[in-house]
Amino acid sequence: MVPKVPFNHRRVPMNMPEEIWITDTSLRDGQQSVEPYTVDQIVNIYKYLSRLGGPYGIIRQTEFFIYSKKDREALEKCMELGLKFPEITTWIRATKEDFRLVRDLGIRETGILVSCSDYHIFKKMKMTRKQAMDYYLATVADAFEAGVVPRCHLEDITRADFYGFVVPFVNELQKLSRQAGIPVKIRACDTMGYGIPYTEAALPRSVAGIIYGLQQYSDVPSECLEWHGHNDFYKAVVNASTAWLYGACAVNCSLLGIGERTG
């Protein structure tokens, strides 16, 4: 059953950036839906991404798991290729132990999972909102201290309290970013595929509203803002296009029609 969509009929303006690009998650989210890739398969996919993205980096970045020996071996082999694009980044949970893996590999940017809906905070994390926020910020602070750009993956944003948690949390991230002199990137993740492209829909369901809100209430610049959508309700393509149209420079995708659940 498709969830009901509340509308408040508040329209936000289009604000398409001058430059848009793609970031890739075939080697991270993609692997969550298929048999794990071999090292050679990972290297070949990385080469394909570089060819598809071309010399100007239309496919700007890709991300790797780093938990197993195989994952780290594949990452190192891809780094040895010396390709400019896509830039190699990683994905970790918001723990100090995970961040040590990033630091040891010498990676310049890492994704950090920061679940932001009450369902995830209370049911999965077993925390209060304040505890979750402090927990996430501690790992982000470690990244800044190490000179690593944190890319915060706001998991389940289309079920989150946008004004009660998302905006205050991103504002705290921006404070840390200014203090460190290092940008923080925000990836808005429609984990359940509940996002819709209609600007008149109420938050947190409106993709346009989410992008507009992150820029207006948290001063996230377009180049630091990306959208990660799922296709449970067949809105992945239109939602990605909407994110571009309303201010996000980057849309996160995967090759070969793969991705957790429905791509």
Image (cartoon, rainbow, N blue to C red):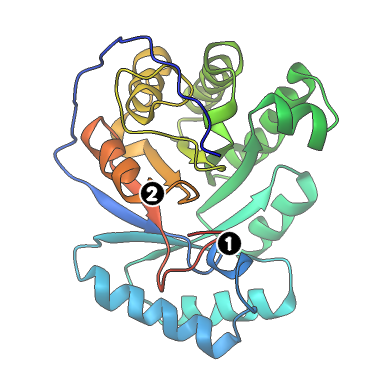
Q: Position of residue 153 (x, y in %)?
A: 55, 41
The label shown at residue 106 is: 1
Left or right, residue 22 beside residue 189: left
- The residue lying toward the viewer, choosing from 74 and 116, is 116
Name, please, the residue furthest toward the left: 18
Residue at image x 48%, y 60%?
A: 263
Give the class, few, some or many, for how many residues have Cα within 10 Å of label 2's Cα (few <14, many ≥20). many
| Amino acid type at mark 2 | Ala
Q: Secondary structure at mark 1?
A: loop
Q: Position of residue 96 (x, y in %)?
A: 77, 45
For disc 2, the marked residue is 236
Residue at image x 38%, y 36%?
A: 225
State the CA–CA distance, disc 1 to disc 2.
33 Å
The image quadrant of residue 69 is bottom right
Name, please, the residue furthest toward the front: 1
| Amino acid type at mark 1 | Gly
Query: From where the camera sits, is residue 135 visible?
Result: no
Name, please, the residue furthest toward the right: 126
Q: Is residue 16 above or below residue 164?
A: below
Give the class, few, some or many, for how many residues have Cα within 10 Å of label 1's Cα (few <14, many ≥20). few
Query: From where the camera sits, is residue 5 visible?
Result: yes
Q: Secondary structure at mark 2?
A: helix
